[in-house]
Amino acid sequence: MNRKLSLFAISLLIGTQSLFGQTISAEITKKGQIPNFAVVDFRGASGAQPLMNTFNGTLFTDLQTSGLFKMVPKSFYPLQNPQRPEDFRDTSGQGLALADWAGSPVNANYLAFGYTAIQNNQIVLYGYVFDVTQKSIQGAQVLFKRYVGSPDDAGARAVAHQFAADIIAQFGGGTLIGSHIYFVSDRTGHKEIWQMDYDGQNQKQLTSYRSITTMPAVSPDGTKIAFTTFAKGTPRIMIVSTASGRPLPFYNQNASMNATPSFTPDGKEIYYSSTASGPYAQIYSANLDGSNFRRISVSRAIQVEPKVSPKGGMLAFVAGPGHQQIYQMNLEGASMERLTNGEGEAANPAWNPDGQHLLFAWTRGYATGGWNIFLMDIGTRQFDQLTSGAGRNENPAWAPDGRHLVFSSTRGGSSQIWTMLADGTQLQRLTSAGNNEKPVWGK
């Protein structure tokens, strides 16, 4: 590889060293008053009871991490929990009246309840949501639906996810069901691309190149993954199908480095960094097969990690000279301006689906010198710091709902994948085997 390549361009790929107030967060995560939500432990009949720990844990966690509700601790619940609407009474009765849930100590606005049973070799869920602040039982029902799944833990988890998704949709939220997180893991002895469900379930290996394979990017429709791999010596770009892992044709230009690809919002092109024109890595675009190769930037400084705004027109990227910072320019390479203020080092830009907010990693703020996750409003240049004092936090990426994000952190010692809301709350660790990093979240 050309020795004039900047150290931060190489360390970006191999991950061996560094690359280079809550107002905004609340704008994304909070839309009005958050209701108090209670969820009883569902019971199972006809052989379904052994699956209830899986079901109840999944349902509660999905609602809790949605950011739409303040979950009422189950220690506050009455002694008796309803399982069906017929269990309710008009007068107070140890949990069988609406007022038992709306009043102290529960103080809930809404209650989810129901039951399951094994019928025709399937788990069947009957799920209800009541507005317990109503005066009458007849006017309290907000949601009722029947769900069916396989009679095992996977089926119990699936119907819990579906019920939670319908509740979240009822309150204006988007579902993450069916979305996947792609990430880099060394658990097999080599850095390869892996994928998992949005809640960390079903982790499986996607590539097997027995080399350094890193920096994944997922297409807008979730059908393709582009990434950088050293499998053929110098860093090259590959694109594979997410369904089969089958490589798709992509022509790499003759260069010491082709790396850090990302898809355009319409999924028809990729932007990436290449040394095809000389020692300084620059930003290029190409069709998905590598044709129509076009140079975007012209600079005597390294430029990597290009990310096209979901609204189009603008490109965020990482560049020098000196300490790398986050910049933006239009898709023709003009009107370049620095977004970060020049302090510390900044990397890993990631656009929110609204095209107005940008996540990135930075070494300034309340833990100066350490990498932490920041959120910037592009219009005002105001930013919030989302992590602090908890290891090295990098490579943030948005979930399709624009409210959750995924990132890598060393807060537990090794590098692992975590999710949280855009206000820094509801942290969840998703991986534990090996070291895991550079996540992206796709449909």
Image (spheres, grey):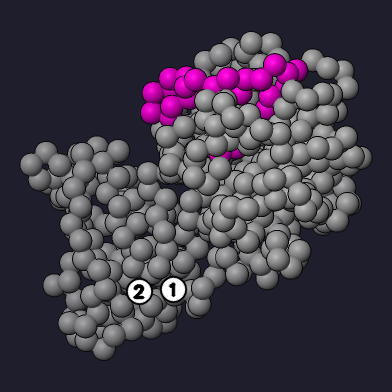
Question: Which element is circle 1 on?
Answer: strand
Identity of the amino acid at label 2? Tyr
- Asked if residue 81 shows in the view, the reply is no
432 in magenta: no
Q: Which mark is residue 110?
A: 2
| Rendered image quadrant of residue 333 | top right
Q: Which quarter of the image is occupied by the N terminus?
A: top right
As drawn, which residue projects farthest toward the right?
Answer: 322
Element type at mark 2: strand
Q: Is residue 240 visible?
A: yes
Q: Check contact, mark 1 vs mark 2: CB within 8 A.
A: yes
Front one among 345 and 73: 345
Whole-angstrom CA distance, mark 1 to mark 2, is 7 Å
Q: Residues within 10 Å of mark 1 (few under 14, many from 20)?
A: some
Specify the quadrant that holds the C terminus.
Answer: top left
The relative height of residue 233 versus residue 419 in the rendered view (above or below) is above
Q: Nearer the viewer, residue 52 or 147?
A: 147
Q: Amino acid at mark 1?
A: Asn
Q: Horizontally, is 308 left or right of 114 in the view?
A: right
Residue 328 tag number: none
